[in-house]
Image: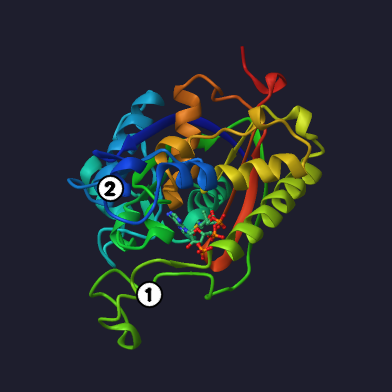
Amino acid sequence: MSKIDILGFGLQKANKKISNFDLEKKVDTSDEWIVQRTGIQTRYISEDKNTSELGYLAAKQAIADAALQPHDIDAIIVATMTGDYITPSTACMIQKKLGINDKQIFAFDLNAACSGFMYALFVASELVDKFDHILVIGSEIISKIIDFNDRNTCVLFGDGAGAVVISKGKHEVYSYVNSEGNDDVLISHGLGLTTDYEHVNDQSHYLYMAGNDVFRFAIKVMQQAIEKVLEESGYTMDDIDMIIPHQANYRIISHVAKKMKTDMSKFFVDVNEFGNTSAASVAIAYSDAYQKGVITKDSRVIFVGFGAGLTYGALLVDGGKENVVE
Ligand code: ACO
């Protein structure tokens, strides 16, 4: 079983805040519909920075919060499905921006759609024996693949980045990660022109989503994944300080809370401000919860997510008072 410490947090918002009222002017929708069906009021869209730049700014904050220097970082994992380029990876772009070029460093991107940060944290937690300080970033400019004429998707998503620095430490990690091998209900064929021969010029790089199917899937697997990590750890919901769920829709989170007979106050929610930032969502929510003082670096938290693929899973990081070094 791996044991980690969370050393630092960072969060970078994209530059342009867009309200539901702004979207009312573009597509046939209303603030009332969006709030009632999703809980989303605003989202941020990046007009001046690419995925690596948002990730870099979040990473810089996380490194500073950890009281480290960029040179102390030994591995970089970036969860994204909207990287700047096909290659080099966004992780290598961020490494360059951080100026870490004279030491051994392990850097790569991971695509698990909206489960990305949770998958990346799982991978990082398995690598802490090998690398001292691992930067785990979720960064996404999902607006690259959103059709702003499609009311079914454009109201749901936003851009942004979150980051943490982890090391080997005192908090046990319990994990459950899974994937269904599905390519029907959530799919984007590629970024703009970098699409495959079957989908050239057919606009199929825009994200397509069978919303109701994803909704039902999300509720089922979020509960399953939380129960798996609780069972493995021997904890109950009462022992958990905070659940950091993927921020796709307030109704999905509240359905899970209701089914698990748990008060909504145990689920951190910021989808109202950020919308669904895909692989960045859990990273942003984790850092947001920390910056708002809702959790500490030693809180016992569960991350739970789902996304295209269909990927899903949960991670329980065992903080708790008995683990806190005074
Ligand atoms: N404004 C107004 N009306 C709308 C809008 C909108 N923005 N979008 C859809 N509608 C309409 C639909 O056209 C439909 O109209 P109709 O009945 O005339 O056909 C009606 O509203 C109801 O649509 P539903 O799809 O039944 O609405 P629902 O309550 O299911 O909410 C939603 C839709 C918000 C998409 C929901 O299904 C959902 O959140 N699903 C999960 C999505 C999700 O989590 N995606 C992220 C996955 S992560 C990743 O990897 C990218």
The residue at the far bottom in this view is 198
| Front residue of this view, candidates 194 and 58 | 194
Q: Amino acid at mark 1?
A: His
Of marks 1 and 2, the one in the foreground: 1
Classed neighbour count for the residue bearing mark 2: other residues with Cα under 10 Å, few (<14), some (14–19), many (≥20): many
Who's the residue at 39% across and 52% down the image?
29
Who's the residue at 27% across and 83% down the image?
200
Say whether residue 202 is visible.
Answer: yes
Q: Is residue 125 left or right of residue 318?
A: left
- Mark 1 and mark 2 lie on one chain; the one further toward the N terminus is 2
Q: Is residue 182 left or right of residue 133?
A: right
**Image height check: is 284 above or below 228?**
above
Label 2 near ligand 1 (CB < 8 Å): no
Residue 274 % position (x, y):
40, 40
Residue 248 % position (x, y):
51, 48
Q: Is residue 268 left or right of residue 141?
A: right
Residue 237 % position (x, y):
76, 34
Classed neighbour count for the residue bearing mark 1: other residues with Cα under 10 Å, few (<14), some (14–19), many (≥20): some
- Secondary structure type for disc 1: loop
Task: State which quarter of the image contains the C terminus.
Answer: top right
| Front residue of this view, candidates 290 and 308 | 308
Who's the residue at 79% across and 35% down the image?
235
Task: State which quarter of the image contains the N terminus.
Answer: top right
Residue 80 % position (x, y):
39, 56
| Front residue of this view, candidates 287 and 250 | 250
Q: Amino acid at mark 2?
A: Ile
Q: Mark 1 to mark 2: distance in Å?
A: 25 Å
Q: Which residue is mark 2?
A: 94
Q: Which residue is mark 1?
A: 189
- Secondary structure type for disc 2: helix
The residue at the far top in this view is 326
**Image height check: is 172 above or below 25?**
above
